[in-house]
Amino acid sequence: MKREFLTSIPPDKALEIIKSFQVTQGREMIHIEAALDRVLAEDIVSGEDIPSFSRSLVDGYAVKVKDTQGAKETNPSLLFVNGEVRVGEESTIAVKDGNAISITTGAMLPENANGVIMEEHARRLHDEIEVTRPVFRGENICFKGEDIKKGERLKVRGERLSPFDLGVCAALGMSKIPVYKRPKIAIISSGDEIVDIDEPPPAGTVRDINKYTVANLLKKEGARCDFLGTAKDTIQDIMAKLEAAREYEMILVSGGSSKGERDFIVDAIEKLGGKILFHGVNIKPGKPVIFGALWDKPVFGLPGHPVSCIMVVIRFVLPLLMKLKGELQTAARKMKGILATNVPSSYGIEEYIRVTIKSTDEGYTISPLFAKSSVISSLAQAAGYIVVPEGLEGYEKGEEVEVFVW
Amino acid sequence: MKREFLTSIPPDKALEIIKSFQVTQGREMIHIEAALDRVLAEDIVSGEDIPSFSRSLVDGYAVKVKDTQGAKETNPSLLFVNGEVRVGEESTIAVKDGNAISITTGAMLPENANGVIMEEHARRLHDEIEVTRPVFRGENICFKGEDIKKGERLKVRGERLSPFDLGVCAALGMSKIPVYKRPKIAIISSGDEIVDIDEPPPAGTVRDINKYTVANLLKKEGARCDFLGTAKDTIQDIMAKLEAAREYEMILVSGGSSKGERDFIVDAIEKLGGKILFHGVNIKPGKPVIFGALWDKPVFGLPGHPVSCIMVVIRFVLPLLMKLKGELQTAARKMKGILATNVPSSYGIEEYIRVTIKSTDEGYTISPLFAKSSVISSLAQAAGYIVVPEGLEGYEKGEEVEVFVW
């Protein structure tokens, strides 16, 4: 009867089991237009210098800087303008001693030029300009390779592509980008009490919440999720839904609030030839989480209470999703603040407390939301959560704590 | 010649003009499956209590708490188990004095019960249980309306729907949700030097970067972007591209690095009957930004240099996008850290410095990237930017500064 309580393991041990689960990632080449937030399957190493030619950063005149040495308002340098180079064109003329070439922003620097004087700092007189201050070497030039050097490693495999990264890809002419495939995840609800949101719930039943919170959390992290339906509390029905999930890369069965329901999930996984790797972790909420391997794929039994379910997804499912995506694990978004009240907790269990954050003159004030784990509205109200480690019996008002921001 | 320099305005003034631009938002009802990150067009007010009935939070026995008063290991209360209520079923029996009803997690609380004792804390003997400690009122019960009360305002118009908010919508049975339409934005590139990334760039030309960075930044914020092509540097070509953008809710013309190019954009907008609202803002990079109204829609001329272009999008285009989306303006993501070097800046101009952030034992170290505004790789390397206000001539090494995180 108390199987899960006997075998509960510490959260770090659970995470170790999850992270050592062997997965393989598929790869694909996708068009740059569709690459936002995708994960790189190869390093990006530049095959060329960017810019591919030295360019003027301003509208003005390309010069040899030595010709402007000592120039001042009272003793300007006089340079003959012997040509023009326009943006988008190849520059075919060279700057000669004592000469200047008119140039627009972004245009190719003429040969022999090593500085550009801004239009505003040169007085044009017919075919000549008066330069009233010295131009320094490299002034107003973006040199060939100054942005990106040929051979430079710009991004590494496992990084997620931001809008700016895609700008780098565009600069390099990468219209196709090698990325990992987005993992396909099957979501199954279970429980005789769970009904779809389209119908009015009969007495004693509740609408399915976890299907939406879980699918959208995973979707936000780049997974493709399919909902495979709600299983009744029978081994047969759960087995049938699991069978339908055979081609997915991860399987999540939510539900199993009661001991009996959880046993059905465990039994269904085992009857299909799967193996339970742990059942029960010393966390609150989320203790009755199930993790196993089925057809060599990871399968989770998520607790039925909406908050418990979400905390298990955040703590255990997302790290595995990162692995399935081939994404490098990044640090969680965290911030520090001062607790507004005491937070009691139990020794020997890692507890997650939903909190709100208020900005004050002195910093941030963190207030716990002491709602039950069945209360979905508390998740929507919270800005994130704090963790009370297994070895602590809580925090005191006024203590500085770290908030994991959703 | 120096038109933009004469008319440059302070950034706050520019933002005021942008934010007072009159826009209207379309609305639509969408299915909950597609509602992630969409913006609510109406408040969400609950039409019912959630849960709709009081539920047990554990597997155990529903009791009248008075029947367990004074119970202890040496003097247990003996209760007769006269029924069972299972999850998903309507409870039709009531708890009588001295009785208990077997109940599973999530099941409907029987009438007259006001506490539930966990299975682990009750000893079952045939048809009776021994309760070895008092049950407190409400113990292990989630009461009707405890999660959400009928009439409760849960979210307000203009809030963006998170996975947890969608959980709340699911709990309320909202399979369709009223949201604002996603704004449609036209992106036009301009410049004789700009070529598409699919072709090898001829001498003197560069690949289009801004098209990708701008479109993806806006896409990340929920806009639908169409790229309408690259205009050559002629008034006619720019006008033709603008004409094609007539049905969009915002128009962005990127390019215009040189004075001549910018004048083409201004002239094209005016020739089509539009009005320039400002041309030039005291910011660096991004100074030559153009903002106007064309067919009562907002139109931006974005600077050509990739970094200048992006800073204008972040500083001016995104706030207007929030307005077009109907989204409440939210605080920027910010963090504080200590400057690793001096940051010189010019008085009278608001300057944006890209920075990297390094976590140390003492907090965060902020290092500026002093790359030119044409250098796209510096954007991809940076974690965010700091702002040197118009009234300051920079910051000193060791000063605490606030970083706007991308």
Image (cartoon, coloured by chain):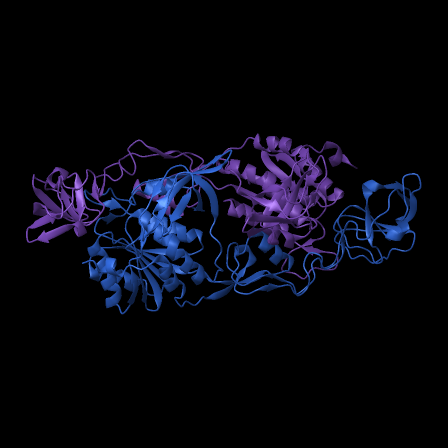
Chain colours: A purple, B blue
Evaluate whether residue B345 shows in this view.
yes
Residue B122's image quarter? Answer: top right
Q: Is residue A28 above or below residue A204?
A: above
Q: Position of residue B332 (x, y in %)?
A: 46, 52
Give the camera-side residue of A118 and B289.
Answer: A118
Q: Residue B290: horizontal and vertical position, in percent? A: 29, 59
> Seen in the image, is B340 located left or right of residue A117?
right
Instruction: Inspect this view and state whether residue A175 appears.
Output: no
Which quadrant of the structure image shows residue A138? Answer: top left
Q: Nearer the viewer, residue B30 or B305?
A: B305
A181 with respect to A315 (left or right)? left
Q: Quadrant of residue B224?
A: bottom left
Q: Position of residue B111 (x, y in %)?
A: 83, 58
Question: How far across and down, in percent of the image, does residue A305 sit?
Answer: 68, 48
Tell me how many marks there are.
0
User: Foreground: A303 or B258?
Assistant: B258
Split into 4 quadrants, where in the image is the N terminus of chain B? bottom left
Q: Residue at x 6, y 51 (%)?
A: A127
Residue extending farthest to the front is A74
